[in-house]
Amino acid sequence: MSSKQSGRVAAASKSKKSGKSSTDEKAEDVLQAVVIADSFQDRFKPFTLEKPRCLLPLAGVPIIEYTLEALAANGVQEVYIYCGAHSEEIDNYIHESARFNPTSIISPFSTLELIRVTDATSVGDFLRDLDKRAIVSGDFIVVHGDLVTNVPLADALAKHKKRREANRDACMTMVLRSIGVEPHRAAKSRVIQPIFVVGLDDGRCLQYDELLPGESFDLDMSIPGEDYEIRADLIDCGIDICTLDILALWSESFDYELPRRNFLHGVLKDWELNGKMIYTEILDEGYACRASNLKLYDCITKDIIGRWAFPIVPESNFVHGQTFKRTMEGSCFEDGVITARGSSVKSSIIGSHSSVGDKTAVHSSVIGRRCKIGKNVTIKESYIWDDVTIEDGATIEHSIIANSAAIGKGVRVPNGTLISFRVRVGDGQKLPENPPARISLLTEGKMPSPTDASLVGPEGIGSLYQEPVDEDEDEEDDQKVRAAALEENSLMYSLGHLSLSSLSISTLASQDAYDSDGESNISGSPGPGVSSPGRLSPFEPDAFHGDAVHGLVDALRADDNEDFDSAKLEFMGLRLANNASDASMRRAIAVAFAHRAAELMSPEHGGLEPTKAAERAFTAKKGAVKFISEVGVGGDSKMLQAEFALALQKALLGIKGLEVLRAGALLAAMLQQLYNLDVLEEDGILTWWADKRAGEDDNLNKVKEKCRVLVDWLENADEEDDDDDEDEDDSD
Amino acid sequence: MAPTHTSHAPSMEKLVKSLKGQPLEASIDAFIYLLKRRQVKGDDCAGATAHILRQVVAKSKWHDVEQLLFKVQSVGSRLVGAAPHEPVIGNIVRRVLGLIRDEASEERNAEDEFGSESASDIQTLAQVTGPPPAARPAPTPLARPPTLATAASFHASKSKSMFNLLSVVDAASAPLTAASTPLSQAAHTSINSLRPEVLDGIEEILDEINQADDQIAGFADIQIHPGDYVLAYLPSRTVERFLIKAASRRKFTVLFVSLEDSRSAAGEGAHAALRKKLDAHGVNTISLASNGLMAYMSRINKVVFSAKVVYQNGGLLVDSGASVAAQAAKAHSKPVIALGGVYKFCPEDPSDEIAGETGDSSTYVSYADGLKVDALEVENTVADYVPPELVDVYLTNLGPQTRHHLAAILADHYKAEDVGFSLIPGEV
């Protein structure tokens, strides 16, 4: 089954730090950590076809160095590295490392063991294996091999210990970093949105869910505790402080694979059965993040250059043999870097013995060791690993170029391109922009792929990397999951994703359990849970419509004097995210305003007359009228205006609890209001009047009839300047 | 339970405790990483370096002085390379190198009855200088009788007042050459006696470092007069002791300047303990934000801050922002007193690289503030350079000094051949 690999444990005499002091300390005080060095994911392909994720260079250093250094900085003594794929490479790397080599006397760890589980298919298998081995005792830390952090864990460890001593069932503490409610680049970088429900007084985690874009969060009403927060503003840095009970839990539930989506979610859900409690330690300071996808890789590199992870900066030279020094303009160069006089390098990192040619501009990028960058090259926000050659005149934007690749003269590498190991792109080639190319020498099955000359040119090597297609996804989730997976694999930020996360969270299962205030941090207790179920129920459950109507109605309801612009922005964001059609936009806007006007007529909101209600609905908010005419109607043509009137008519009929006759009166009032506000013109309304669809069934007809007076008045408006008719509009 | 006990994080205390039990190389590497992680920083670096170098002398294998010097040089240059932002490490390495050279030449002198000409020169000089006239006795016990030339000048310098300091200036070049000449013969020196001598010497350096703050505080009542308004910029440990000592003798007012005006609450909390102590002595304290500093300057009698390092031109490396205070003081012609033990005097010239050290961006902008993280390039300069003309008095553990005496102090403490030690490529 599983085979233990190369556990060259350092001799006891070399376990120095524990050597003397351990005599008066209990064995339990030796801190142990488990590093999970295989993620069982495809997010870094095609690079991970040849190298494990934890050995990919981030800001010039293999990612695992950051993880091990973080453990050393926290005084961890014994480290167990679990590896699956590429375990030999990791083994070689560790044993060639001057510092972490287990036989090295300068190793900060007394024990460093690599454990290979050959038949593992998930992180769950690793942890179940760990349970069988019984090598850990007491509290231990579980981290992933792609963690970058400068956080001192002493506090979290002490708190965990205290909780555990008070209650044996407090078996895990997760370290999370808060990133605020503003759109943060680390939040934009993730595709799966984790939602933590956290007890306010003790930090106990009560519920955990992961949302894909477009999904909404379901608050579990049975969760224990009085006061809690629903938090979507947390980075999950994957640092768990565990007790042995956690491993037992893993072993009990043999089908759990992922530590969060399966394990955490499941354990919290069944807390009444297992009685285990999991706590969170939410950090407001310090840096902690996992390079768990390409966008986060990008984000962390920027953070390191921007010195947000201090003292994790290149010139700290945490890896033996590094010689980075900080230069002007926020860059760091290693020894032997040659930059030609006419070149400009800003906010970048350049490894030793690389050269940058004349008139070349490098900005916010990382260039590895021994790279040759020609003249007139532009490199922007790109990550270029070791031994890469870039010929004169090439342009590289926000791409990753792996070791020993070569880019020919004048090649344009557009945003989001991934170029794997040893790929050669011939002179003058233009790589595709949308979608950006992922070029590799290997296929999914790690076989050499035939060169695609149309892509890389006649003298080039490499072909497009083809994504394997997963068949065994659930039918309904299929599209979302695949879209999310695609998103995870991409370096580019997609616009749609940005505006989504906060909105989708506020739409709780009951559609309207809380007022969404646009923030992702909602506090509450189960009390007000289901205040008016189904108030917006006529809306179809399609993601765009529900969210959009919600947002608009909330904006209309709000008492503040804010401009309608932000609501408009949100609406447009949603529209882009869902690729909504003009018709569905129109429908959403009509429904929102109809809903608001009907609400104003209801006794709880003052029971306004239809005219007043229509006026209030349209004019209470500055910019709302403009929004309707620009977005809702979308043009001057009478056809479009008629469409909007029709949408309004249907929307009013759809409102529950509004009698048909009152709906008709309201429609007439609204149409007149829109006419007065110059949104709808005479011709538009008349076109609607003539439209067959407006009188298709009984109810529609009844509503329509109510507007006859208005239409008559409009028809005669040109000839007779009659004021008398206006009074009749109001008559029900 | 004390947090230090529960914490697993490595620290200098833990390292010092475990020094004996672990191989030298492991200690050095552990220390280098403490420096890189900033788990040891600022004023703690000097003592920590001395501890490590003592291990180098005690544990490494060497057969003659040359080998020992080479060992110390190469370890020293690694330490300096690990923390180029802490030049004080280089000072301690130079002190230890100088010490080894001194001890070696001493041994040689002891064997060679005639002694070298230059050495006897200093001998007479030392006798002329005689027992220090300053009232304060030398705090470190003298290991050897003061008849030995270099040792005498070394120890005499510790209790020197401004008065007799001038007399050494003339002979400043003498010990430099004196100690460098006999090296070729030093090989004959028996290393058996050299090792304990050098270890004792390092112990003395450690004592000097540990006592420097108290000694500086001893001069407090000379510097601070009753009724003074003293501006303390980001009070360090040294400044704290200085103020508390002064408070026990004098009634005056202290104005604290904290750097982060936006987080003034946190800043006050940091000085709370100090303020409480000063209050107990009846000294008034006022907290200022650094941007309000200029407005108060006309009321202030003197500005006090501690130097990280004093360069050979008299310029200072200080906590960022102190330079503003010094300039404000200059504009109002108020005296600036820089506190710092003699071990902080560095025989180098200031360089951009060191003064331009940038620290953690999240000190000023929270990483949780997504919009700012994206939009801003934050440069958090943690250190400032104060040009020599802005500093009036250097208050050291040897008493107050002026810029003109720096050369003499440097010459007393460092050998010319050790100034550029970190440039010598070394391997261990």
Image: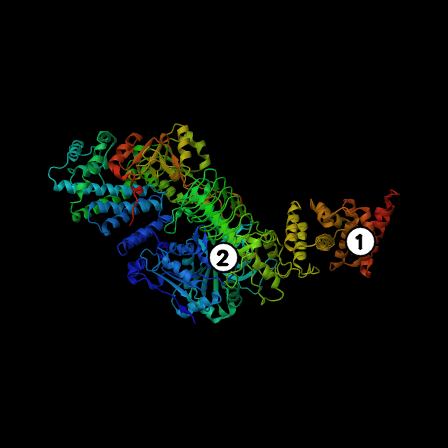
Q: Position of residue A476 (x, y in %)?
A: 63, 65
Q: Is residue B143 visible?
A: no
Sort mark 2 into few (<14), some (14-19) or many (20+) by Cα contacts within 10 Å.
Answer: many
Whole-percent x, y for residue B42 in the image: 35, 44
3D distance between C-alphas at marks 1 and 2: 65 Å
Query: Which of the two discs, 1 and 2, sits closer to the camera?
Result: 2
**Residue A564 appears in the figure:** yes
Q: Quadrant of residue A663?
A: bottom right
Q: In this view of the protein, which residue sits in the foreground, B341 or B304?
A: B341
| Residue A493 percent location from the top left of the image | 57, 52
Residue of label 1 = A665
Secondary structure beneath disc 2? helix
Disc marking residue A47: 2
**Image spot of residue A479 (x, y percent):** 62, 62
Quadrant showing the N terminus of chain B: bottom left
In the image, are marks 1 and 2 on the same chain?
yes
Kind of element beneath mark 1: helix
> What amino acid type should be assigned to the residue bearing mark 1?
Ala
